[in-house]
Image (tube, rainbow, N blue to C red):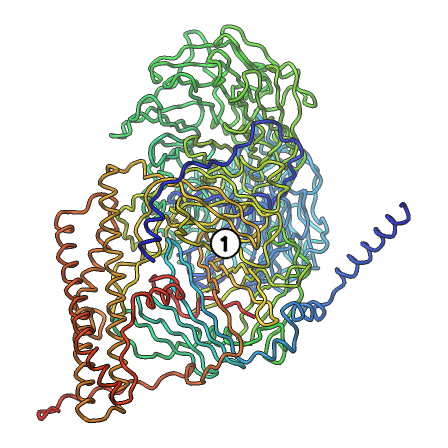
Amino acid sequence: MIGKRASGGLIVLAALSLTTPAASADSGVRITPNTFGAIRARAIGPAIMSGRVAAVAAVPGNQLTLWVGAASGGVWKSVNGGLTFKPVFDEHTQSIGALAIDPRNPKIVWVGTGESWVRNSVSVGDGVYRTNDGGETWEHVGLEDTEHIARIVASPVDSDTAWVCATGHLWNSNEQRGVFKTTDGGKTWKKVLYVDENTGCSDLAADPQEPGILYAGMWQFRRSPSFFTSGGPGSGLYRSTDGGETWKRLTDGLPKGELGRIAVAVAPSRPSTVYAVVESKDTALYRSDDLGERWEKRSTSAIVQDRPFYFAGLAVDPNDFNTVYKASWSLGVSEDGGRTFTGTGGSVHSDVHAIWIDPTDSHRIFIGTDGGAYLSTDRGNRWLHMRNLPISQPYHVSVDNAVPYRVYTGLQDNGSWMAPSRADGGIGPCDWKMVGFGDGFWAFADPSDGNVIYAEYQGGNILRVARDTGEAKEIKPYAREGETKLRFNWNTPVAFSPNHPGTLYIGAQYLFRSRDRGDSWERISPDLTTNDPARQRQEEAGGLTIDNSTAENNTTIFTISESPLDDQLIWAGTDDGNLQLTEDGGIHWRNVAPNVPGLDGRTWVSSVQASIHDRKTAYVSFDGHRHGDMAPHVYRTTDLGATWEPLAPNGLEGYVHVIKEDPKRSSLLFAGTEHGLYISLDGGAHWVRFKGNLPPVPVRDMTIQEREGDLVLATHGRGIYIIDDLTPIRALTPETIDSPVALLPARPAEMPIAGVSWPFTGDDEFVGDNPREEAVITYWLKRRHLFGDLKVEIYGQDGTLITTIPGSKRVGINRVAWSMRLPPPKVPPATSLVPAMRGPRILEGTYKVKLIKGKRNVEGTVKLVADPRSPHSAEDRAVQQKTALDLYHDLGRLTYLIDAISDARDQAAARSGTARPKRLRRRLNTARDHLENLRRELVATKKGAITGEEKLREKLGELYGAVNRYDGRPTKSQLQRKTILEGQLETAERRFETFAGGELSALSASLKKAGLEPITVLSQETWNKRQEARGGGGAEPLASPGALPLVVF
Amino acid sequence: MFRKTVLFALALTMLSGLASAMTLDEIVAKAVEARGGRDALLAVKTVKITGKVHMPNGMEAPLVWEWKRPNKLRSEVTIQGMKLVQAFDGTTAWMIMPFRGNTDPQEMPKEQAQRMEEQADFDGPFLDGATKGYKLELIGKVDEEGTEAYKIKVTNKFGDVTYYYLDTDYFLPFKEEGKRTIRGQEIEFESSIGDYKKVGGLLIPFSTESKAKGSQQGQSVTFDKVVLNVNLDDSLFAKPAPKPTPAPATAEGK
């Protein structure tokens, strides 16, 4: 039977490819979030540098429980001291501003969404959430229009009472800001401190001994696309002594005039001592020793003064009222009551935001930075980095054509990186390689030169990096003589020509093109922006504290796309609303933004993509959030911008960063918004959010690896995700979606070479998933399958069944995996396992797939191909396959032999008890012993784990494992060894045959004569039938007894 | 025609009204009914199942599961001819892990024993659950992966929680998810259940896929044959006495 199965599998079928739908507008494709069913995005990191952490929290005295609020990557909880973290907030808004653990019950945790470190790239929240079960389930409890929350204070005496410090909108005015109080667990909120619609709360601190005493910093601030202002008449420091019901502004000793962001902290060990960092024209740390009545200016050190809007974390040592920590570029500390400051030590990422100090042990400090969360157990001298938090913030992503292809990305404050899309054992920290510094944005491999990588960093700086040596050359273009400097966006666009490998574009206010890898640049446009001087005041940006990091650079080009169908047709979108195109390679340009309906012509163009399918078609997304417009704006033109058709909303939510058209099916569109990935199957008429293992995280950019058909996402807050193989999504036609069951096509399945991987690095590293290493068979179910069989059968062309795979049963797209191997070989029982867990590889080719759903059968094919990296010739692979198959059969033969020997032995033993005369009994015992001795010569029988005992079974198993692990020609030694072992097997078979035909046969005659049952030798045929009834051969032991859920009743 | 339409619409409204108003007890009663009914379930004294366990990378192994009322269970998975046995005799959970040259039966540690005891419960939480220490709670009607379902929270006597999803048409469980703690480590799992087939008047799911929640790969168990009321001796479930150590050969020999 084994032989039949195997030979059936080796025959190649003629291709029966499933039809790919025409790239027509598929109107009427009804999709829901369940349509994509089992299609799953896989996270590949990077996590080694982690990403911005906006809030941290922990339980006093509990060394194991740690909470992390990521800037735009959700809430994470560790129950093992930071060794591993679990995302507990993946159904909700991913931007986190505040975390507060109930002091009375650590299972109750409040989350304020919307980071309050309001940098230009900050995300938005949607109010306050609460869990009563340690993060298992969450309830949204209101304040949905606050957008940013700086702090939540949970009452130490009542779990239903909390105060929320709502920073409020960043980009426009709103009234839901200030300090809010609930006394009913969040059911209702009372706005207890409010200044005006431009002023929000920047910090809130409570007196730990007198819960009615609260201090609040109020902050007037505003961003626009080109400007940031911190400070204004609304800012001030306030105190309440009645639980927030009434407030008094504190002024005595504080600076006069306009104030900016205020941080405030109470000394837990002496609550009459309060510290505040007050931004003003001379930002300083102030201290009060009388509950905030009078303040004394203590320090104006750089640690105190730097970037008040970004570094406003302040914490007092819980056990020493004279030690105060200040978040800054690094973590600063004063041990003399705030008079002098110094930086703490160790290797920590710059830009500290959040600080928690264990009240029971001041040595334990937990901080959040732009590079993740760190824990110190020596008061900040040395730090443990939480390397298990994949919350990096890519701005853009690109891929190359290597095998496996590599992914390139630039991260907020964490440089530029690359990694393979597949690595042995998963994509771990050591697979990610840094290729650029600064704030990373675009990073590309040069398609014309395998040794060249381009990596951009903020403000138009771009590096050309040699892959082999890592040497980097600065290649940005400069202004001409007599011109003021070029205007580059913070997130400057860089693009490759799809028509001329090696041609590179970069956008300032002008568009530049290089054909020599950046050694020279040709200016191919006039100023494509409005050149509005009112939007060029970045040197004055910051308000009270000048903050000109290039983050406010405006009137710049932001997005570039050369048509894949016409190298003279180039689109460029600007951050001040112009949408320009040229049809003659840059000689003439025209602004088509005024033709876009429903916008004011000044809305930031976040992405433009020239269609892959039609020269006159392009897709554009506009992003108005920097004016407070959070709505999606996506358009398509089919006449080079003369007219525009809106493609939103219809299911699309959040402001849009990017829109992409599928290269194979023009009606398949992907949109990345601030709240996730959205897919349309009908050219943008309807959208649904993709939920397969992908939280509602900002999707800033995406690209499609065309060879693999993979969609690669830059999620700003959770690193890079990959959706492997879009083929089945491309095949979702209205007809498919209407049918109860359908097989969907998939890309050919590669039989991956297994590399050596044996890592035991502990559990504190994030390792990203690889693509499935099996052939994936994909099908559609309209309804969930409940009754009767649902299984997938794989056949050779002659109709021989190779294997049967249990089916998955959910609504939408289902996926099952086939190992592309025969079932494992039969192995005789002994005292240890041999390396024969997996069956031999099936040869490349096309195999028939039969999906059986109850009485319904659907047929299709699956195509197996060799790993493209495989160095083995077809002939060598065939030799390997044959050798492995021979040994597979040899193990089967030995299994039969051992079973037949054991069976005859047991029969002899069973007869011997009752046999008379004594001589017959003796003969039976002798036969029994002879058979047992024969068995012992063939299989290991010593008890113990490492006996070193090697009999024919162990030798055959070892050889099979060695040959089966390598896909090329076996060694000569292995082939010789096989001949020797097969000789031994034959000898053993002959010995048993001889014994069975001689002594056993004679013995049976004597038994008959004595009126006893003769000994029947187990025939190969009977044995085959038994095996068939029993199914598979061997597999790995189940890891944990009792882990297998048994579902019967 | 109009009248008919209106009446139909009204009937629909009433039906959906009724459906949404179903109590936990009604749903549980329907669930028992769907599986064959109380009497039919109670008439089953033993079950013997043969099937396969399918693991990633094409590894598979034959299995035999045997149950005996009220709470005896034996599971046997054969790997390279060696039998991994896990069993519970109503009091003691034990196992034989034969892969390292040791075939002595070993008693299971407490938490693993509790898992075995939980799985040994012949009728599960929906039949006389309260008397067996289960606490049931209706979470509500939910959309679970595109299927309308009643979500029921079941807490067993050890305090472990499992959520059952019963489809609203047939009241059959199609998914379970939950959490178990082994040595303080939480293991979250989800199981997809289906391929219901009639066996002697009962509906039995012939296929279950289980995996760690959110993971890409899991393992499936499929049944080939389910036999009810087969004769199963109590000794099958009892932990065998340790094999006597063979006496050292004496000088005289035999």
Whether residue B151 is situated above or below residue A394 in the rendered picture: below
Q: Is residue A496 left or right of residue B40?
A: left
Mark 1 closeness class: few <14, some 14–19, many ≥20 residues within 10 Å: many
The answer to whether residue A341 is visible is no
Q: Amino acid at mark 1?
A: Lys
Please provide percent x and percent y for residue A436: 35, 31
Please provide percent x and percent y for residue A744: 52, 41
Q: Secondary structure at mark 1?
A: strand
Please provide percent x and percent y for residue A354: 49, 48
State which quarter of the image contains the N terminus of chain A.
Answer: bottom left
Camera-nearest residue between B144 and A546: B144
Residue B155's quadrant in the figure?
A: bottom right
Query: According to the image, label 1 marks what residue?
Result: A791
Camera-nearest residue between A513 and B241: B241
- Tally the marks: 1
Camera-nearest residue between A609 and A989: A989
Please provide percent x and percent y for residue A860: 48, 42
Residue found 53% across the figure and 46% down from its top: A858
Whether residue A869 is situated above or below residue A608 in the rendered picture: below
State which quarter of the image contains the C terminus of chain A.
Answer: bottom right
The answer to whether residue B228 is visible is yes
Residue A945's quadrant in the figure?
A: bottom left
Residue found 65% across the figure and 71% down from its top: B32
Residue found 38% across the figure and 14% down from its top: A514
Which chain is disc 1 placed on? A
Q: Is residue B240 left or right of residue A282?
A: left
Q: Is residue B180 left or right of residue B96?
A: right
Whether residue B135 is situated above or below residue A893 in the rendered picture: below
